[in-house]
Image (spheres, rainbow, N blue to C red):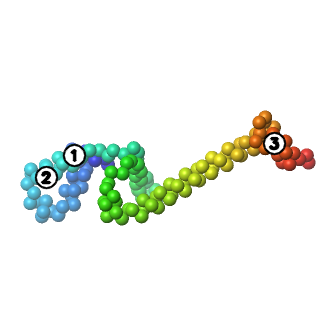
Amino acid sequence: MPAGEQSPTGHSYAAERLLGAIPGHVLDSFTTVQVQAIRAASRDQAPSRHWIDYRASIPWMGRSFYLVVMVGKERRSADRVLREGQSALRKVGGVYVGAVLLLLIGMALTGWISLASIRCLQGAQGCFLDGGVWVRSVAIRPL
C-alpha cells in the first residue's frame, strides 16, 4: 500500500498496523489525543517517489504471493546502507547490471550480423562479405 492510503475505517493502513502491533495494556494507556496523533502522522506521510512503483498480488497454487518492483534514486546515506548490510549487495548488483548490459549488446550484435548475413545470402547489394558472392557460393550449393 502506498503511504497515506486509507483503510475502510477511514484511517491509514500504516497507523492501524502500528497500533495493532502495540500490546493491549500499552495501547490502553494511550489517550484519545495520542492515538489520533499517531493516525494523523501516518496519514500525512508523502507517497512513494519512485520512477517505477509496481505492486502486484499473485495467486498461485492456493497461496498468494506479492511482487514489488521499485526503481528510483537512492536517498539513503552511505552509512545507513552499510548499517543495513546492503553494501555488498550494491557491488553484486552492479556486476549483474554490467553482465546484463554486455549480454544485451552481444545479442544485438549477433542479430545485426545474422540479418546482414541473410541479406548477403539473398544477394543484396553492398554486402559486407565481398558482395556476398563467396558466402552464396559456399552456403548455397546445388544438390
Q: What number is the disc on residue 35?
A: 2
* Residue drawn 45% across the image and 61% down it: 91
Q: Name the residue under label 1.
A: 43
Decide: marks 1, 2 in contact (CB < 8 A)?
A: no
Q: Is residue 7 above or below residue 87?
A: above
| Mark 1 closeness class: few <14, some 14–19, many ≥20 residues within 10 Å | some
Q: Nearer the viewer, residue 79 or 39?
A: 79
The amino acid sitting under disc 3 is Asp
Q: Is residue 124 above or below residue 11?
A: above
| Mark 2 closeness class: few <14, some 14–19, many ≥20 residues within 10 Å | some
Q: Is mark 3 on a helix, strand or loop?
A: helix
* Residue drawn 87% across the image and 45% down it: 137
Distance, label 2 to label 3, CA atoms, is: 81 Å
Q: Is mark 2 on a helix, strand or loop?
A: helix
- Find residue 26 and report its horizontal and vertical position in percent: 12, 63
Q: Which of 60 and 56 is in front in this view?
A: 56
Q: In this view, does 127 lie above or below 84?
A: above
Distance, label 1 to label 2, CA atoms, is: 12 Å
The amino acid sitting under disc 2 is Val
Q: In which quarter of the image is residue 29?
A: bottom left
Q: Mark 3 points at which residue?
A: 130
- Find residue 52 and report its horizontal and vertical position in percent: 41, 45
Q: In which quarter of the image is residue 118?
A: top right
- Find residue 116 and report its horizontal and vertical position in percent: 73, 42
Is residue 55 visible in the rendered image? The answer is no
Decide: marks 2, 3 in contact (CB < 8 A)?
A: no
Q: What number is the disc on residue 122?
A: none
